[in-house]
Image (tube, rainbow, N blue to C red):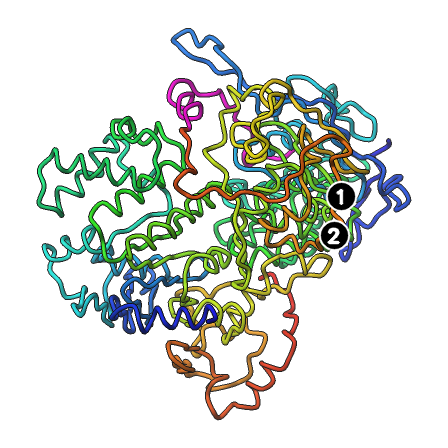
């Protein structure tokens, strides 16, 4: 795909990137823009004076999915589940251990030289921390302009200061800041404004794909809604495709078209947003949804409390990784295959994939009981999973608080002995 | 009986007023002038009651909590006015020895970040028993026993082994359990929990919230919860005080405040939470940002961001209007002179506030 024409030349101030992007017409929406195939990212654990590798943290451990052109794909999960690493690996901020990432069919992981540089321009990142991701010693014109300079060529003329500064101003305006803020420094801005600067930096290169890594989680509610509104507007204005990573399930529900749920380096469930929130089938997804505190005081539902902590990704449990905390498994009297077989990520209904051996056992009525926000119409006729030979869960037991805890041995153990070598990504850099 | 009545019952029936904060003003003298971090905070909490202070960062909720514990460093801080009456005694008037007895003994605090608030070079057992030795007539061995029991009470598995562990050996959720155990070890009358679950993942947050509720009900301790999360408020407490720019702007029961907010700021907060019903629509964001502490607006502090504002009492700050038992709002809408504006506020579907960045 030819990329050079994108946003060629200084653009009009009102809609700087409205220029034609080759082949980015609406009719291509819905096709896969980014395909991820069996992607793995492992980090070595080194110990001893010789720093020998004694094990591996499997941060991302075999993930398959696609992000379609024009959609927002939301990725949720708890800290340490690998969602940020997955995103960073896709945009080549982390080195993949194996697997494939295809951008419009081109193998991103094998790019180097000019191809890599072109790809950098097409895939941009919005970082989580609006303070740490902006260099405090650079004025805004340089923070946003640095990427332009790196991508400068004869056609776009970004090598020239004047052209660059104009484009920086244009994009400040796009994200709702004043054009003349270019000479200011990051410390002069509030958290919400800094996040807008981070967004302007990503947009200035006219990318097609944006990996937004927890873009609103550091912000207060009232500012968070301003930024979410902005992202929604920009998506339409610039035909953007998003991989949106967050731990806040309400935010993900609000902004996403499709959602994937991660646990310990793997996708455990993926579906359209409405389907996932109304008919979750993986026991982990159900527990997550049940755990969200609801601001409506009228809602009084039983809450599903998961036991224990997330195990260490350096030493994930055998079989299904969730089996150590799984309420469904206990309710089904601990079927053996949970411990021995890694469940395939299979298609349960059209577009709804689940990695659970027993997903058919879950019925909506049971889910509605513990997920207050599900707003589920309970069908008068319950579906009959007996057809597939699975026991049905009609009621989800909610454990009392006293039997909630389990030792977090693995997590504690590894934390004390050896630490994974976390590669230092460019925290304030660009892609 | 509705939950509101139940809360009233709790308020009027359960016990006398335990904590009464009246017009508290905590200021800080800094190079550029005076930061009035808390400037007019009033609320009261009965014995065994559960109240949340809610607000966004910088609204003064944590400074209020630290003022109650007298953990404000003076100077640069100073108590510029008001009273904190705890069982009738004004905590602001106690000397250092007296306040040390209250702090940790009668009032305990759970902090947001369990890693930084635990001592990294002391074992869990030593940290808990240190507090017990200070406040209870027991010897070292007795203190260790109290520590062990308090770990059992908060559901820490294998408590004997935990006593000998250091904080870095524990997960985030476990550390927060230790903090709660430490707070409980001296049987306090009041527990102040400052964002106790903010640093935790959602499934661990759920465990800790259940634990706090459970412990509060079992021991009958009063709970003052500091949080920014209205979801946590709805599930954990009976009463709420909403804070903005160093002031309490609205108080009431959880049902009253979250279902029929009487202050435009509270309404704005509730409307800006993304939720299922708002899918596909723009969120109605509160425009602008919180005021700069050195350039506070003269009258109502929320006026520049308020979608309902009109030129009421321009330079005068609205008082806390009394709207019923423990139901208050700091908004000119409740001045009888502006009844027509109130009718509009209550009748109008919330106006979409224009989104402004800077």
Image point (31%, 45%), residue name? B180
Q: Residues within 10 Å of mark 2 (few under 14, many from 20)?
A: few
Badge 1: chain ID: A
**Residue B105: x and y, percent?**
18, 52
Question: Where, quadrant-wise, is the C terminus of chain A in this rendering?
Answer: top right
What range is drawn magenta here?
A: A408-431
Q: Considering depth in this image, is B238 or A178 the residue closer to the camera?
A: B238
Query: From what the image shows, is residue A402 above or below residue B234?
Result: above
Per the image, the residue denoted by label 1 is A383
Asked if residue B249 can be seen in this view, the reply is: no
Q: Dot 2 corresponds to which residue? A: A379
Depicted B234 relative to depicted B337: above or below: above
Q: Residue at point 59% right, 40% down?
A: A127
Q: Nearer the viewer, residue B211 or A70?
A: B211
Q: In the rendering, at what x and y percent does residue B312 appear?
A: 50, 86
Picture coordinates of residue A152, whole percent (x, y): 73, 35
């Amino acid at each position: 795909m030819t990329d050079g024409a994108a946003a060629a030349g200084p653009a009009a101030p009102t809609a700087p990137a409205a220029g034609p992007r080759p082949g980015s017409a609406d009719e291509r929406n819905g096709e896969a823009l980014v395909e991820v195939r069996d992607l793995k990212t492992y980090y070595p654990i080194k110990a001893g004076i010789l720093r020998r590798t004694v094990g591996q943290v499997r941060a991302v451990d075999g993930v398959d999915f696609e992000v379609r052109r024009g959609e927002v794909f939301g990725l949720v999960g708890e800290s340490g589940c690998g969602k940020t690493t997955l995103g960073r690996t896709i945009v080549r901020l982390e080195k993949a251990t194996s697997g494939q990432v295809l951008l419009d069919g081109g193998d991103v992981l094998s790019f180097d030289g000019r191809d890599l540089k072109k790809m950098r321009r097409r895939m941009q990142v919005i970082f989580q921390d609006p303070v740490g991701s902006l260099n405090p010693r650079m004025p805004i014109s340089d923070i946003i302009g640095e990427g332009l300079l790196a991508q400068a060529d004869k056609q776009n003329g970004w090598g020239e200061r004047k052209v660059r500064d104009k484009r920086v101003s244009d994009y400040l305006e796009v994200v709702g800041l004043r054009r003349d803020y270019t000479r200011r420094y990051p410390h002069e801005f509030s958290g919400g404004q800094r996040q807008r600067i981070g967004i302007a930096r990503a947009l200035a290169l006219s990318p097609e794909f944006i990996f937004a890594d927890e873009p609103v989680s550091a912000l207060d509610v009232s500012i968070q809604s301003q930024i979410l509104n902005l992202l929604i507007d920009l998506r339409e204005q610039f035909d953007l495709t998003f991989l949106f990573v967050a731990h806040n399930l309400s935010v993900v529900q609000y902004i996403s078209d499709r959602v994937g749920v991660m646990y310990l380096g793997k996708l455990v469930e993926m579906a359209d947003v409405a389907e996932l929130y109304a008919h979750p089938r993986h026991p982990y997804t159900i527990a997550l949804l049940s755990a969200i505190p609801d601001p409506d005081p009228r809602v009084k539902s039983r809450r599903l409390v998961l036991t224990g902590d997330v195990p260490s990704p350096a030493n994930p449990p055998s079989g299904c990784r969730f089996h150590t905390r799984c309420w469904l498994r206990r309710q089904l009297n601990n079927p053996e295959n949970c411990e021995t077989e890694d469940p395939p990520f299979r298609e349960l209904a059209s577009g709804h994939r689940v990695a659970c051996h027993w997903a058919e056992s879950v019925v909506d009525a049971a889910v509605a009981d513990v997920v207050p926000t599900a707003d589920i119409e309970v069908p008068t006729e319950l579906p009959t999973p007996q057809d597939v030979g699975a026991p049905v869960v009609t009621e989800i037991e909610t454990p009392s608080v006293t039997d909630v805890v389990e030792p977090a041995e693995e997590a504690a153990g590894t934390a004390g002995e050896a630490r994974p070598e976390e590669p230092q990504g460019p925290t304030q850099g660009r892609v | 009986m509705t939950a509101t009545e139940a809360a009233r019952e709790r308020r009027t029936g359960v016990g006398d007023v335990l904590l009464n904060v009246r017009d508290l003003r905590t200021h800080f003298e800094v190079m550029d002038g005076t930061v009035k971090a808390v400037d007019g905070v009033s609320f009261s909490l009965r014995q065994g009651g559960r109240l949340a202070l809610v607000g966004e960062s910088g609204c003064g909720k944590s400074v209020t909590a630290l003022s109650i514990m007298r953990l404000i460093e003076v100077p640069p801080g100073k108590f510029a006015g008001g009273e904190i009456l705890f069982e009738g005694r004004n905590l602001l008037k106690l000397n250092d020895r007296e306040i040390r007895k209250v702090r940790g003994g009668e009032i305990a605090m759970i902090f947001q970040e369990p890693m930084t608030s635990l001592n990294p070079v002391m074992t869990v057992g030593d940290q808990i028993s240190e507090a017990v030795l200070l406040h209870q007539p027991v010897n070292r061995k007795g203190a260790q026993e109290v520590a062990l029991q308090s770990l059992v009470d908060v559901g820490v598995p294998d408590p004997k082994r935990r006593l000998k562990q250091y904080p870095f050996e524990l997960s985030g959720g476990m550390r927060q359990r230790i903090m709660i155990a430490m707070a409980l070890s001296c049987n306090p009358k009041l527990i102040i929990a400052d964002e106790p679950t903010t640093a935790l993942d959602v499934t661990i947050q759920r465990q800790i919230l259940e634990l706090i509720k459970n412990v509060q009900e079992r021991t009958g301790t009063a709970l003052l919860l500091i949080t920014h999360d209205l979801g946590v408020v709805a599930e954990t407490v009976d009463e709420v005080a909403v804070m903005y720019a160093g002031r309490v702007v609205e108080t009431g029961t959880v049902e009253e405040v979250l279902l029929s907010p009487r202050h435009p700021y509270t309404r704005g907060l509730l409307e800006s939470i993304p939720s299922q019903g708002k899918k596909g629509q723009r969120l109605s964001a509160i425009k602008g940002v919180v005021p700069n502490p050195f350039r506070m607006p003269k009258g109502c502090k929320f006026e520049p961001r308020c979608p309902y504002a009109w030129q009421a009492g321009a330079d005068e700050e609205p008082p806390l209007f009394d709207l019923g038992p423990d139901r208050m709002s700091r908004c000119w809408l409740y001045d009888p002179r502006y009844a027509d504006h109130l009718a509009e506020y209550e009748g109008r579907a919330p106006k979409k506030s224009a989104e402004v960045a800077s």
